[in-house]
Amino acid sequence: MPFRTPAGRKILYQACAAVDLAEMLADVIATEGPMLQTKTTRRTHPATRELIQVRALIARLIDQLGLNIEVVKPVGRPVRPTSWMPDMR
């Protein structure tokens, strides 16, 4: 486990802090809306760009920790042989 080393724990703490920040930014965007009205035009909320950057950081940290590996399992039931099989009696 990469969490047993001090460096791994530091990366994990950074990932947790980044998740907290992403949640906070998402709440701000949900409250104020994704667009802001200026004097002349509508603009994307500045927190939207920050949220995208924080999510990218989270993805990189998860990759560094090795937590992005998904065990690949076959989908469905195991297949039965469809060709002729000799009688083994």
Image: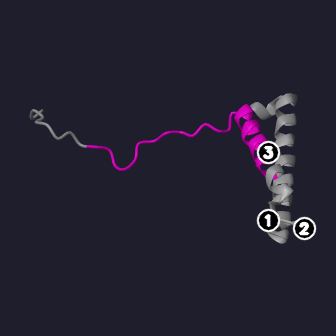
Whether residue 72 sits left or right of residue 66 in the image: it is left
The amino acid pointed to by label 3 is Gln
Task: Please tell me whether residue 8 is drawn above or below residue 58 in the rendered image.
Answer: above
Quarter of the image for residue 58 reads top right
* Residue 53: mark in rendering: 3
The residues bearing labels 3 and 2 have C-alpha atoms spaced at a distance of 27 Å
Answer whether residue 59 is magenta in the image. yes
Magenta residues span 51-79
Mark 1 element type: strand
Task: Please tell me whether residue 1 is drawn above or below residue 82 in the rendered image.
Answer: above
Q: Quarter of the image containing the N terminus? A: top right
Residue visible at 86% across and 64% down in the picture: 28
Q: Position of residue 26 (x, y in %)?
A: 80, 61
- Foreground mark, 3 or 2, reads 2
Q: Position of residue 40 (x, y in %)?
A: 86, 66
Residue visible at 74% across and 32% down in the picture: 64
Relative depth, front residue between 9 and 33 = 33
The amino acid pointed to by label 2 is Lys
The residues bearing labels 2 and 1 have C-alpha atoms spaced at a distance of 13 Å
Mark 3 or mark 1: whose residue is earlier in sequence = 1
Q: Position of residue 87 (x, y in %)?
A: 9, 35
Residue 1 appears anywhere in the view: no
Residue reaching furthest front? Answer: 40
The residues bearing labels 3 and 1 have C-alpha atoms spaced at a distance of 18 Å
Relative depth, front residue between 4 and 38 = 38
Residue visible at 49% across and 39% down in the picture: 72
Residue 21 appears anywhere in the view: yes
Mark 2 element type: loop
Residue visible at 28% across and 43% down in the picture: 79
Which residue is denoted by mark 1 in the rendering?
A: 35
Which residue is denoted by mark 2 in the rendering?
A: 39
